[in-house]
Image (tube, rainbow, N blue to C red):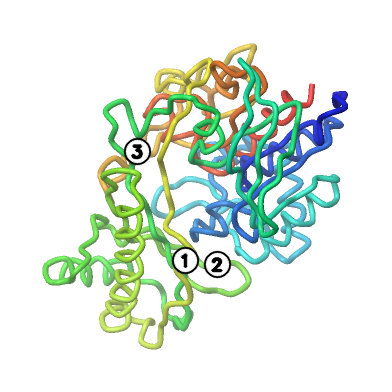
Amino acid sequence: MIRKAESDYDVIVAGGGAGGVGAALGAARAGAKVLLVEKYGFLGGAATNAQVLAYCGLFQQGPEPIKAVGGVADLVLDELRLLGLDCDPFQSPTTANWIILLEPEAVKLALDRVLMKHGVSVLLHTRVAAVTRTANRLQSVTLAGMEGRRRVAAEAFVDATGDANLALLAGLDCRVGNEAGHLQAISAPIRIGGRNRAVPLDRNAIIAAFDHYNKTGDFPTGRTDGGIYAEVPISGDLWWMMFDHAMADLSSESYTRAEQAARAAAHDYVEVLRQHVPGFEDAYLVQSGPQIGIRESRHPPARYELTADDLLTGRQRPDGVARAAWPIEDHSVAGKPVYKSIGGDGYADIPIDCLRAKGIDNLCYAGRVIGADSLAYASIRVMGTAFATGEAAGRFCAT
């Protein structure tokens, strides 16, 4: 790619989660000069800002882990191994899906390092506040950072914000939630310390304790199976996902209530474990957040929407640029996820037009904002798939 004289970068990527990191690395490895912009003071997306401590979608379902995503995701895993994580696939005893368990502080540092090695410029504590658009092309973005605002021009842009913020600022008409406007529930995983690891985890005791709590507690959970849990690498803390919360809309008021409920529920839930589950007598809450886990918000228009049928039949196609292997995991009802496996060979191809904005020629999508109908979205939103769609978007923008 050759920059025009007035352009500061070849590619600007908005959002530093798995999709944004994938896009930045994909573009940089293709020879582009890249700027990655992230609103937090660290990278990682839900893995570091919402306690979603697992890379999902790197492997297919099945009795053995079959790799579905490599490329830049492997670069990240290599950095994590250098920091002490084994990054071996772990099969969840609850869902039987293969995941990579994470430690968030290692993820933050690993992403810093891998982007530095590939010459990606990173601006943290920075948001895209406005865009300049001429007809069907974006010309520049206005960045709001600690020093104020400044305009930065590029030849191509990637929206990896998760909430389609760049597409929204560009004037694209975004769908909210599914086709009926219904949003998938948020999650609020937590980390728990102080558990006696010599005592085996007793799922039945957790189930019984919450059967009682749900009758009298302030934050009854829809998860009647004891939730999803695993030990966090290095620290040995227990990672536990037990709280989900329905979202009526995208208002700040609704998100504030969800954040407050998640924090209060976290303290309640740990106290339930302390009082009723063996091995948790000295347990304590290590961390919630920093924010709730947002599963769904806006969907910007793409040139093609991946469909549920594409996934359920395992459709493979010549214009595929990434693979979707995580099952359709629908959280339309809080705490009651519904899973549907990918058909065919256990994965489906994601075509390039899912990553291309409809109506803007030099804007691509990565991560959970790519084109997908409501059920397909329930598969492609996971971080492993986001690395793959991000890398493909970055490479496309760099050519």
Query: What is the CA distance from the residue labelled 2 to the residue labelled 3?
Result: 25 Å
Q: At x 63% / y 25%, what residue is drawn?
A: 363
Q: Quadrant of the C terminus?
A: top right
The answer to whether residue 204 is above or below residue 5 is: below
The answer to whether residue 244 is above or below residue 119 is: below
Amino acid carrying label 2: it is Val
Give the mark, 2 or 3, whose residue is nearer the N terminus. 2
Give the percent coordinates (x, y) of residue 393: 67, 28
Q: Secondary structure at mark 3?
A: strand
Q: Which one is in front in this view, the residue at disc 2 or the one at disc 3?
A: 3
Query: What is the CA distance from the residue labelled 3 to the residue labelled 1?
Result: 21 Å
Give the percent coordinates (x, y) of residue 100: 59, 52
Q: Which residue is mark 2?
A: 232
Q: Which residue is mark 3?
A: 330
Q: Secondary structure at mark 2?
A: loop
- Left-right relation of 242 to 232: left
Amino acid carrying label 3: it is Asp
Q: Secondary structure at mark 1?
A: strand
Q: Which residue is mark 1?
A: 239
Q: At x 60% / y 51%, what residue is drawn?
A: 89
Residue in the foreground of this view, choosing between 34 and 107: 34
Q: Residue furthest top?
A: 318
- Left-right relation of 87 to 325: right
Q: Quadrant of the N terminus?
A: top right
The answer to whether residue 56 is above or below residue 147 is: above
Give the percent coordinates (x, y) of residue 217: 17, 71
Asked if marks 3 and 1 touch (Cβ < 8 Å), the reply is: no
- Left-right relation of 377 to 333: right
- Left-right relation of 1 to 246: right
Give the percent coordinates (x, y) of residue 37: 67, 47
Asked if marks 2 and 1 touch (Cβ < 8 Å), the reply is: yes
